[in-house]
């Protein structure tokens, strides 16, 4: 599991650690770890040139100390062609760090004061750099560039060679440390070397601009809960419901699926296939004749009609608007009633697609376990109704976690917000971290993919997982199955469902080995 703590909690932990350590020890640890990573990255580059961009705070301090270490280490080996530091801020740079870097022989170009010739010299340096170390801002930075350095930073990054390997110190400068502002100007790194623990910027929607995440241990002890986390393969395997010798199909979990209608016939096939493929004890499909016939023909394991279930997946391919349409097919209208009955049942429920349109607030029975699985547009529609306000898809994509949280709080449900990054957001009162999953292939953005996810998540609810775990596990396994279905190329949703058994087997085998 990778867990991320908020900036205030990180600062508190740093303060606590520093109280027991000699002055400068924590930064020395950070710089040592950073220098080690830089050394490894340049080990194969003959006559490498390393340039650090240095801001005025602790982030620049880390960078200067690390460059000094690199320069010292190279005194003996003379493998590097040059090590330079560009001071970008008018406020100068970390005093001890700068003195140490100068002493170690690091070339320094100071841009404070704004002289054009200094900026030209700095641009020449970065144009030649094989490794660019971004130490402008860390957790003390605000999103984007501040006015005083914006022109310089733009010029420096414009001059950077596309081939240069960009290593961000702690986080890419200009990225929002809290990971909430997604579109700020600033650095996109190939690798981010962070210290102590990950921060939200590394896991939330800003994660893609961090590149590879490398964690350097500096001995922080966190006294608070993380705000975000990403499940790794072992976490998922540990949560996966593995049947024991005493289990039967009922104890493993029966999932009821209310999906599709006379016009939308594919979604039920996908959701039911996914639930069966993921290992449901039994899947019971409820729907009008045409999709029922299709499910019968394609998923012979499923049963049909009303009966005992332990959880529901409601909504894939469901058209809730037929309830208001006098000319609508009778079976479709009945399907909306069935969906309402499932929502009213008090049983655990995945509420997806069309069923989200049936919710105006909490499900009727207090405490009913609920996992909502909207994409950004569906969440905007749901929140607009619940809050009686106009909320757009753009509002949601600009602050996905904030909006998912509002829906989770208002509906007492866990919200799995689908997108290139998927967030599983429990109500605030739970105190649980947001779960983030961002390594699904972009090819998964395809029709039917959400139906597979809804079937998979429903199967996990039926097996007894709570909505938070079911959402986190389903999002991760769905992404892995997307890779498994056709790594590096287009995938169709049905293939993702069919890839579930081998994806799950691989996870369980890996964890057992
Ligand atoms: N405090 C500690 O014990 C440790 C701190 N460490 C490093 O110190 C960093 C935090 O240091 P600071 O609190 O000094 O803050 P930073 O170094 O992250 O940034 C603060 C400086 O950046 C400027 N700045 C803020 N927003 C800006 C923007 N949008 N554009 C341009 N400049 C901007 C500020 O004027 C200020 O001078 C961490 O990210 C980490 O790299 C590490 O050495 C680990 C230990
Ligand atoms: K940085």
Image (cartoon, grey):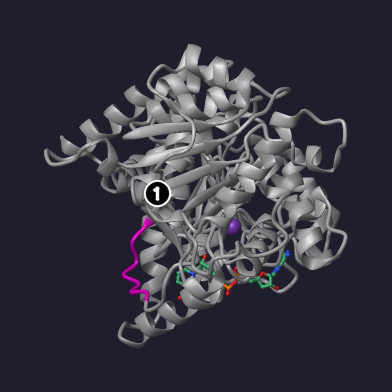
Q: Is residue 442 magenta?
A: no
Quadrant of the frame with the C terminus: top left
In the depicted structure, whether residue 457 falls above or below residue 114 = above
Q: Which quadrant contains ligand 1?
A: bottom right
As drawn, 196 above or below 132: below
Query: Picture coordinates of residue 267 (x, y %)?
Result: 61, 26
Q: Quickly name the residue at label 1.
A: 231
Is residue 420 in view from this perspective?
Answer: yes
The stretch of residues the image draws in magenta is 216-222
From what the image shows, is residue 338 above or below residue 362? above
Magenta stretch, main secondary structure class: loop
Q: Position of residue 88 (x, y in %)?
A: 71, 61
Residue found at the far left of this picture = 245
Q: Residue at x 41, y 77 (%)?
A: 224
Given the current orientation, which residue lies at the most extreme bottom position? 19
**Circle 1 SS class:** loop
Q: Nearer the viewer, residue 119 or 19?
A: 19
The residue carrying pointer 1 sits among few (fewer than 14), some (14 to 19) or many (20 or more) residues within 10 Å by Cα, namely some
- Residue 405: where, in percent of width, then height? 63, 64
């Amino acid at each position: 599991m990778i867990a991320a703590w908020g900036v205030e909690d990180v600062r508190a932990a740093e303060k606590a650690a520093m109280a027991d350590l000699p002055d400068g020890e924590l930064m020395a640890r950070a710089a040592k770890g950073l220098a080690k990573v830089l050394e490894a990255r340049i080990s194969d580059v003959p006559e490498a040139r390393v340039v650090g961009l240095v801001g005025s705070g602790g982030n620049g301090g880390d960078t200067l100390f690390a460059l000094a270490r690199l320069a010292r280490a190279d005194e003996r080996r003379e493998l590097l062609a040059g090590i330079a530091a560009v001071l970008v801020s008018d406020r100068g740079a970390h005093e001890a760090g700068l003195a140490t870097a100068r002493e170690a022989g690091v070339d320094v170009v100071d841009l404070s004061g704004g002289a054009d010739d200094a900026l030209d010299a700095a641009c020449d340096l970065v144009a030649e750099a094989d490794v660019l170390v971004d130490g402008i801002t860390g957790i003390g930075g605000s999103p984007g560039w501040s006015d005083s350095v914006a022109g310089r930073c733009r010029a420096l990054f414009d001059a950077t060679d596309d081939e240069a390997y960009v290593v961000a110190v702690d986080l890419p400068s200009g990225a929002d440390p809290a990971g909430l502002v997604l579109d700020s100007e600033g650095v996109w790194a190939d690798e981010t070397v962070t210290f102590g623990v990950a921060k939200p910027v590394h896991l939330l929607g800003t994660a893609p601009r961090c590149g590879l995440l490398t964690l350097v241990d500096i001995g922080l002890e966190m006294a608070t809960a993380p705000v975000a986390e990403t499940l790794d393969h072992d976490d998922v395997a540990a949560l996966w419901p593995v049947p024991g010798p005493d289990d039967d199909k009922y104890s493993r979990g029966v999932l009821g699926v209310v999906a599709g209608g006379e016009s939308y016939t594919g979604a039920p096939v996908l959701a039911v296939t996914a639930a069966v493929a993921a290992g449901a004890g039994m899947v019971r499909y409820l729907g009008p004749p045409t999709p029922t016939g299709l499910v019968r023909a394609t998923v012979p394991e499923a049963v049909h009609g009303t009966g005992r279930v332990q959880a529901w997946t409601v909504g894939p391919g469901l058209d809730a608007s037929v309830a208001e349409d006098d000319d609508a097919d009778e079976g479709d209208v009945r399907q909306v009633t069935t969906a309402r009955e499932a929502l009213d049942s008090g049983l655990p429920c995945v509420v997806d697609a069309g069923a989200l349109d049936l919710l105006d607030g909490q499900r009727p029975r207090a405490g009913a376990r609920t996992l909502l699985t909207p994409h950004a547009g569906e969440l905007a529609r749901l929140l607009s109704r619940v809050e009686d306000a106009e909320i757009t898809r753009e509002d949601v994509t600009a602050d996905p976690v904030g909006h998912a949280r509002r829906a989770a709080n208002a509906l007492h449900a866990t919200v799995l917000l689908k997108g290139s990054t998927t967030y599983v957001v429990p109500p605030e009162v739970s105190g649980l971290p947001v779960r983030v999953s961002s390594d699904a292939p972009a090819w998964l953005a395809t029709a039917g993919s959400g139906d597979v996810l809804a079937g998979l998540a429903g199967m996990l609810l039926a097996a007894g997982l709570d909505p938070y775990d079911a959402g986190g596990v389903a999002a991760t396994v769905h992404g892995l199955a997307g890779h498994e279905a056709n790594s590096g190329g287009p995938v169709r949703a049905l293939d993702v469902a069919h890839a579930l058994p081998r994806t799950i087997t691989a996870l369980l085998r890996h964890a057992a080995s």
